[in-house]
Image (cartoon, rainbow, N blue to C red):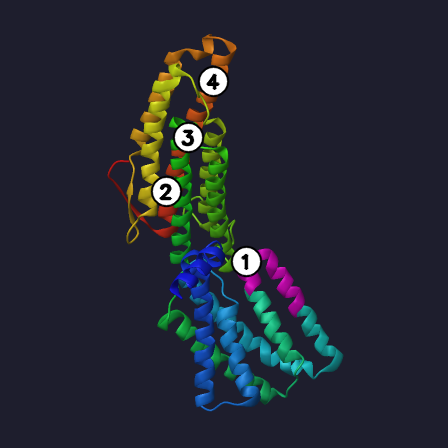
Amino acid sequence: MPKALNRVYLKFIRPVDPGLFISKYAAKATVCCLAALGVGLALPIHGPALFWWMVGALCSVMFRTGSTFGRRKMYGLVLLGMVCVAVPVAGVAGGAGYWGLILVFILAFACFFLGGLGVSASILGIGCLVVSLISFFDPAPVAPALMRSAWIAGGGLLSFFVNFYLWPFDPERVLLKSARLAVEDMGTFLDGLCARVKNPRVTDEALDYLSAEAIASIRRYRTFMESFNIDPLKGSAASGGAGLFYFGMIRLYESLVGVFGHIGFGDGREDFYDLKEAFYSGAWDIGKAFDAFADMKAGTYSRPDFNDLFAAVEQIQDTLVEMKGYRQGQDSQGQFMAAWGAVSELKNVVQGLKDMMSLAENRFRLKGTVNGP
């Protein structure tokens, strides 16, 4: 049975949810609602009161937003406050006939207006609109409408307590794990490119597969951001953000693809042997930096000395210039240009890796210790 489950996980779950990140996230939401339901039945709360009790519990887990753990708690309380105010108003307005439609218009306008202010504001607006419409189409006098707020607050705060205190789930931890997987897959792609330098029998199809795995991991990071209702474009030059780190990984991946486009330089040419050896050695050292980031422990990783990595790439460039292949025949000039393109893109990989690590340290509050490449 475990082998069968492992096969199912590898084939169907891991490509979408490695580490069961989103599965745990969904399971926690379910537990929060079940806890609220259990307490509600034990009090006991029945009928419409239990319905509004569970509406409050669902508000705490369905309409979550915020890029950090602290902001998610803040936005959760803000949403509960908005709903507790809007629900009794909507319930009373629902019995006012056509005049109540004015409230619906105001809520709908506010919801779609907030959508232009960002992801967090949009999620809060949609949550308030949905719950308010439920109350609007179930009109009630003032006293019962106010009781709805009490039941919503009770169920919502209980679910909030389970969500953020009994079983806290920090989205930054999930995003960091996803980022490490993406960097690990990009490092594997670079390892494949290293092997291709010395072994022409490494096929483009094999490298295409590694490239596809890397870009799938980067897409998964963005998917996780969106599943947590974090704006992928959000970030600042000063603090770094989810979006800046995402684009940092994109730039790094594009540099690796650039190396892939020129990796066949000097195939079958004895005069390129020393250059290919130097390229292999430099790329291998860069690959160790990918592994160091992916293998971090407790937010600490071995940050490479980028001065040494840049110096190694410049030495490869000097070796290439000394070959003077650009002065020889057309074939040698073509090989020289391909080699120059590969070395230039390798330098971009080093720069992209440096930028990505700097953004990661700001985004996830990491600590990089310089111990060499």
Q: CA distance from mark 1 to mark 3?
A: 43 Å
Tag 4's secondary structure? Answer: helix
Q: Amino acid at mark 4?
A: Gln
Q: CA distance from mark 1 to mark 2?
A: 26 Å
Q: Amino acid at mark 1?
A: Val
Asked if the stretch drawn in magenta spans residue 118, the answer is: yes
Q: What's the mark number on residue 304?
A: none
Which contiguous range is marked in magenta?
Answer: 107-123
Judged from this view, the residue extending furthest toward the top is: 328
Q: Residues within 10 Å of mark 3 (few under 14, many from 20)?
A: many
Query: Picture quarter containing residue 6?
Result: bottom left
- Residue 232: % across, % down: 51, 51
Query: Which residue is disc 1 drawn over?
Result: 119
Tag 1's secondary structure? Answer: helix
| Residue shown at 44% from the left, 26% from the top | 342
Asked if the stretch drawn in magenta spans residue 113, the answer is: yes
Q: What's the mark number on residue 196?
A: 3
- Residue 337: % across, % down: 48, 19
| Residue shown at 50% from the left, 16% from the top | 334
Q: What's the mark number on residue 357?
A: 2
- The answer to whether 328 appears left or right of 300 in the picture is right
* Residue 301 appears anywhere in the view: yes
- Magenta span: predominant SS is helix
Q: Quadrant of the C terminus?
A: top left
